[in-house]
């Protein structure tokens, strides 16, 4: 009979995810020899090699690929069992949420209100970009996520809960500032600073220009909304960002929104988790809170 432990499954899954013993060791807070030894013991008890080393890199063998699917299912079941235990303990459970970088601008206000209503909730918030977030969802590394529309074809449950308006931002002294109903075609003469590949904001912006047959001249690429705002203020180009990210700069009159036809780009924020995931009581409560209260809470806090 095959004899392996949950610990070995966790370690194997982590090495397979990172394809690196050292990175797996780091994320599991173990030493690299401890990780290699657990994988070797697992291989010994199966009588099969799970990884092969070519040059400096390691790869999953076909047997490793097959086993990985089973291991992910086992870990999903274990996490469901943990959620059930948290259920039994009620609202004091732990909630781990990932949000796309732009959603990091409003999620803390929502969490503040949620925690007022559920003071025992223990929350862990991870702000990351859309692409990383999708990867982490695929690996079942959190309870739920907040992001723009997820790609079709992933096995996800996604519900929209709030509007996300993407606006064109410019320095207050820009020649187009203050003009009304600027034709969209005029944008083909401007340079736009863009977020990194994999950002939801960037994908939406590129798609919008393509759908409206406007040539998009892209300037410097930057991986945070903050850097784009600073660069726009400094005159490096225009930017297209979510209205959530620029409240402070508008209040301080450091940036302005251009009044361009067909703008803002209207998107939605979605609350997302893997389909079939058994949400804990606290996770389910947070999801309902977003669907029922997010708009009202943020309307109050931004006044
Ligand atoms: P971003 O994602 O902050 O990575 O651009 C926002 C989104 O998912 O719409």
Image: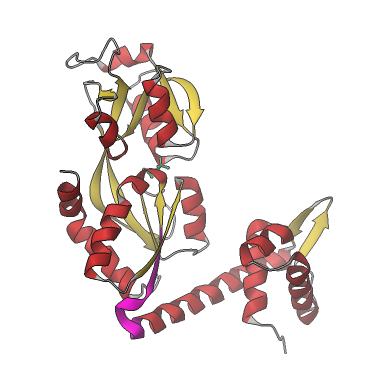
Residue 173 visible, this orientation: yes
Say if 178 sits above or below 271 in the image: above
Magenta-tinted stretch: 87-97
Indicate which quadrant contains ligand 1.
top left
Name the residue at 50% across, 57% down.
Answer: 136
Taking the image as shown, residue 110 lies to the left or right of residue 11, namely left
Is 90 in the magenta?
yes
Residue 67 visible, this orientation: no
Q: In which quarter of the image is residue 73?
A: bottom right
* Residue furthest right as drawn: 55
Horizontal and vertical percent position of residue 149: 35, 47
Taking the image as shown, residue 264 lies to the left or right of residue 132, namely left
Is 137 in the magenta?
no
Pick whichever, 56 or 69, lies toward us.
56
Pick whichever, 241 or 117, lies toward us.
117
Q: How many numbered discs, if any?
A: 0
Pick whichever, 136 or 276, lies toward us.
136
Figure quadrant of the C terminus: top left
Taking the image as shown, residue 176 lies to the left or right of residue 32, namely left
In this picture the colour scheme is secondary structure
* Residue furthest bottom as drawn: 1
Figure quadrant of the N terminus: bottom right
Say if 212 sits above or below 119 in the image: above
Q: In which quarter of the image is residue 144?
A: bottom left
Name the residue at 15% across, 49% down.
Answer: 300
Horizontal and vertical percent position of residue 237: 40, 18
Name the residue at 74% across, 57% down.
Answer: 59
Say if 131 sits above or below 186 in the image: below
Name the residue at 29% across, 13% down.
Answer: 173
């Amino acid at each position: 009979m095959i004899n392996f432990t949950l610990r070995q499954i966790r370690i194997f899954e982590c090495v397979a995810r990172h394809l690196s013993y050292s990175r797996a060791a780091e994320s599991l807070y173990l030493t690299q020899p401890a990780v290699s030894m657990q994988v070797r013991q697992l291989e010994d008890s199966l009588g099969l090699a799970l990884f092969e080393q070519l040059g400096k890199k390691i790869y999953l063998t076909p047997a490793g690929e097959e086993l990985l699917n089973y291991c992910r299912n086992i870990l999903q079941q274990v996490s469901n069992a943990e959620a059930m235990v948290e259920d039994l303990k009620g609202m004091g459970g732990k909630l781990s949420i990932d949000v796309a970088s732009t959603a990091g601008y409003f999620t803390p206000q929502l969490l503040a209100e949620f925690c007022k209503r559920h003071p025992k909730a223990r929350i862990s918030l991870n702000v990351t970009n859309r692409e990383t977030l999708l990867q982490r969802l695929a690996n079942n590394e959190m309870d739920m996520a907040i992001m723009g529309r997820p790609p079709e074809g992933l096995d996800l449950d996604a519900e929209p809960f709030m509007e996300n308006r993407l606006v064109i931002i410019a320095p207050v002294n820009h020649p187009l500032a203050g003009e009304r109903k600027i034709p969209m075609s005029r944008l083909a003469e401007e340079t736009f600073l863009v977020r990194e590949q994999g950002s939801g904001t960037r994908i939406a912006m590129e798609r919008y220009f393509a759908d409206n047959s406007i040539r998009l001249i892209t300037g410097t690429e930057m991986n945070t909304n903050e850097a784009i705002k600073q660069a726009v203020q400094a005159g490096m180009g225009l930017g297209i960002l979510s209205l959530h990210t620029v409240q402070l700069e508008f209040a301080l009159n450091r940036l302005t929104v251009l009044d361009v036809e067909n703008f803002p780009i209207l998107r939605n924020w979605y609350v997302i988790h893997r389909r079939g995931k058994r949400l804990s009581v606290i996770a389910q409560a947070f999801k309902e809170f977003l669907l029922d209260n997010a708009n009202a809470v943020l309307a109050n806090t931004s006044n």
